[in-house]
Amino acid sequence: MRQHVNPLSKNFNEIEYIPSLMEIFGDSELNLHLDIGSAAGEFLFDLALVNTCWNYLGIEIRERLVKTAKLKVKEREMKNLYFLFGSANNILNDIQNKFIIENVKSISFNFPDPWFKKRHIKRRVIQPEFINILSNSLQKGSLIFIKTDVKDLFDYMDFIISSNFNFKTIDIKNFNYSKSFNPNKVKTSREKYVIVNQLDIFERIYMKI
Ligand SMILES: C[S@@+](CC[C@H](N)C(=O)[O-])C[C@H]1O[C@@H](n2cnc3c(N)ncnc32)[C@H](O)[C@@H]1O
């Protein structure tokens, strides 16, 4: 399977219809977490099975992974987990889908693709325009979590989010995970690999103020 998909390809201009939160989840009033670049969704399955008082939504650009994850949700009859296929930027830039950002309590960007080459930086999921959209529509107090093993990518993401005056950095050492979307600090697939290989992890949490 191809690992990297160009999110700027016109293949992703067409966005799938997204039902309302009431249609998607068993209880749409629960806190909603959005994971961007959810891959096969293992992280969200682990979270959603245990934390049934949260709803989880994953966006992933590799269609086959999303199809398989959707089937698994159906088979397991899970009512607090949903996956969307497409480029997160296109989906969330679309005015019709504004309700997603307006309703999330937190968003995670876990180990996003680094797109190392300078000419490919526009393919990174975190872009100033995208962070502006989040900053305009997120509720105050909503959180953004970023995590990566690539220091340059961390510095880039941190610069873009910190440059937006609507976000402030949270002290991660004193952060109370028990009330977050991830009370048991479940690890993503990439994170497990990074830990086994003793690579560094760079992470930060921001709050919309
Ligand atoms: C390195 S993987 C990390 C997967 C997972 N978050 C983890 O930590 O194990 C990055 C994922 O983000 C997806 N992705 C990259 N750009 C995306 C975009 N613009 N919208 C949605 N998904 C994207 C990739 O297809 C890939 O599955």
Image (cartoon, grey):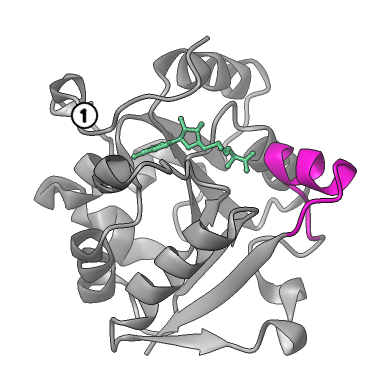
The x, y position of residue 101, in whole percent, is 31, 60
Q: Residue 171 at x, y = what percent?
A: 64, 89
The reply to whether the magenta stretch includes residue 75 is no
Residue 132 visible, this orientation = yes
- Image point 80% across, 42% down: which residue? 192
Q: Quadrant of residue 159?
A: bottom left
Q: Is residue 8 above or below residue 36?
A: above
Of all residues, the one furthest to the front in this rendering is: 118
Q: Identify residue for label 1.
A: 17
153 lies left or right of 121: right
Say whether residue 176 is left or right of residue 79: right
127 in relation to 96, above or below? below
Question: Closest to the observer: 190 or 153?
Answer: 153
Residue at image position (54%, 66%) is 145
Q: Please state the extent of the stretch shown in magenta in the rendering.
A: 185-200
39 or 100, nearer to the observer: 39
Q: Nearer the viewer, residue 140 or 150?
A: 150
Badge 1 amino acid = Tyr
| Image x and y of residue 95, in percent | 11, 52
**Magenta includes 186?**
yes
* Number of numbered callouts drawn: 1
**Residue under the image location 47 percent in, 22 percent down:** 66
Q: Residues within 10 Å of mark 1 (few under 14, many from 20)?
A: few
* Residue 31, visible in the rendered structure: no
Q: Residue at x 28, y 36 (%)?
A: 19
> Dividing the image into 4 quarters, which one contains the C terminus?
bottom left
Name the foreground residue: 67 vs 49: 67
Helix, strand or loop under label 1:
loop
